[in-house]
Image (cartoon, rainbow, N blue to C red):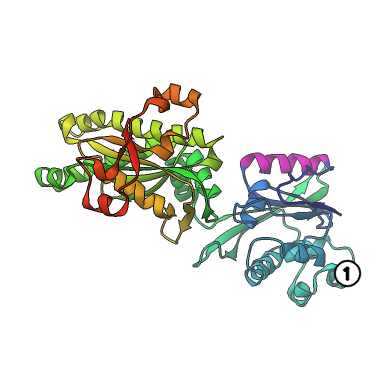
Amino acid sequence: MVRIEVGEPCPLPDDPVLAEWATAMRDMGDWGWIVDSSWRLRFVTDEQRLSLAYDIEMAPILIGEHLFGPEMTEMSTYWRTDSRQQHELWGRFFVNAGGLILADTVGGKAELRRVLDPLWVEMVDDLSPSDVDVMTASSVSARMSERGGMLLQKTLRIRDAEGGHRGTAIVFKPAVGMNVLGTMALERDPGHLTRMRSVASARRRPAAILFADLEGSSALSRTLSTSSYFAAGRRIVRATDRCVVDAGGLVGRHVGDGVVAFFPVEVFDSESAAARACIRAARDIEAAMPEVASRCGLPAEQLVMRFGLHWGSTIYMGNIGTVARSEVTALGDEVNEAARIEACATGGLLLASKPLVERLTDDDATTLGIDPGHVAYTQLANLTTATEKARRDAPAIAVCEL
């Protein structure tokens, strides 16, 4: 028995045939398991282990033990899933593969009862041996959200060139057609999806914060037809999101024609890199608006964005997922302050706070064309564009125009 700890990669099986299958499953990004001809675990894909721990880490596993033995049941208690839900899922897993397990067990039902965890022993009476090469479309309930969902289980016999039985591969996928899964994946940036999963667990995360909003949107909505205004809003959102994603940030919520984005330090190499990416994204959004206006048949001056950039040292950030959507959000005073800064950027200004700008290293500042040592700051309350809320909630925050 070999215990593979949290975060450690699972080694390929010693058996070359099983190793070939393991490599293919790993490279395809499958949720999958490989057992030998006695149903001892030989390999688990990284994607499977990540899902067992809700993407926080790769769950620990035991190589060399029976997949449904007491040692594996004990190991499952270390996974970041509710034990009752895990036992329900594992029970369905066993039932779906039970005929194959029984066929592979020398000694039949008596021997199978001996090696199984007591949780599954009573299920043996209802099993009949089966030796089909492929068993598909067995549904397994999986509560990865408060509502839960269904997985499809495909069990495949692994045979060598001579037809000898070497083991079994078990592969799972959501019970949704590839048309839906493919559309969802291919229309979205894979790097952004990965970053969203990296903040699945909510906690305090220092980050640069970007607020951007279209100025004069109410007046614009009154001059355009509803369909034209909708098309303009869609183009604006697509352009802003692309700029944030290209800069390595995380897109937060959209409010009207505005966007909120975050640039967590953990995603970048340093605080300076996060601040640089935030400023870069804002400038890219600003530069993209004339083209968006042209595509909408509008003068460039009618699509003007205002920006508020700030640094959040103590914001609480995480991914809120429901049955309908997944969204990165953050709470904290500094998030509210960033909104106040943006509201003061009337006239298409790009206002950045002193805490953000002064996190730039000399190299990053030079790359952006900024000289932090000679920047002149103004407190929000002293800006001619200061809003009542800014004077009330964040009057002393120092900002500069970039």
Identity of the residue drawn at 26% across and 45% down: 381
Identity of the residue drawn at 42% across and 41% down: 187
- Taking depth in this image into account, of 99 and 228 the one nearest to the observer is 228
Question: Is residue 338 one of those drawn in magenta?
Answer: no
Left or right: residue 321 versus residue 60 is left
- Taking depth in this image into account, of 396 and 255 the one nearest to the observer is 396
Q: Give the residue furthest to the left.
A: 223
Residue 54 percent across, percent down from the top left: 60, 56
* Quadrant holding the C terminus: top left
Residue 81 percent across, percent down from the top left: 63, 64
* Quadrant holding the N terminus: bottom right
Q: Give the residue furthest to the right.
A: 107
292 relative to 170, above or below: above
- Taking depth in this image into account, of 372 and 239 the one nearest to the observer is 372
Residue 197 percent across, percent down from the top left: 53, 49
Residue 327 visible in the current orientation: no
Left or right: residue 324 versus residue 348 is right
- Taking depth in this image into account, of 354 and 306 the one nearest to the observer is 354
* Chief secondary structure of the magenta portion: helix
Q: Which structural element holds mark 1?
A: helix
Q: Quadrant of residue 225?
A: top left
Residue 93 visible in the current orientation: yes
The magenta segment: 16-28
Mark 1 = which residue? 111
Question: Is residue 26 one of those drawn in magenta?
Answer: yes
Residue 87 percent across, percent down from the top left: 68, 70
Q: Amino acid at mark 1?
A: Glu
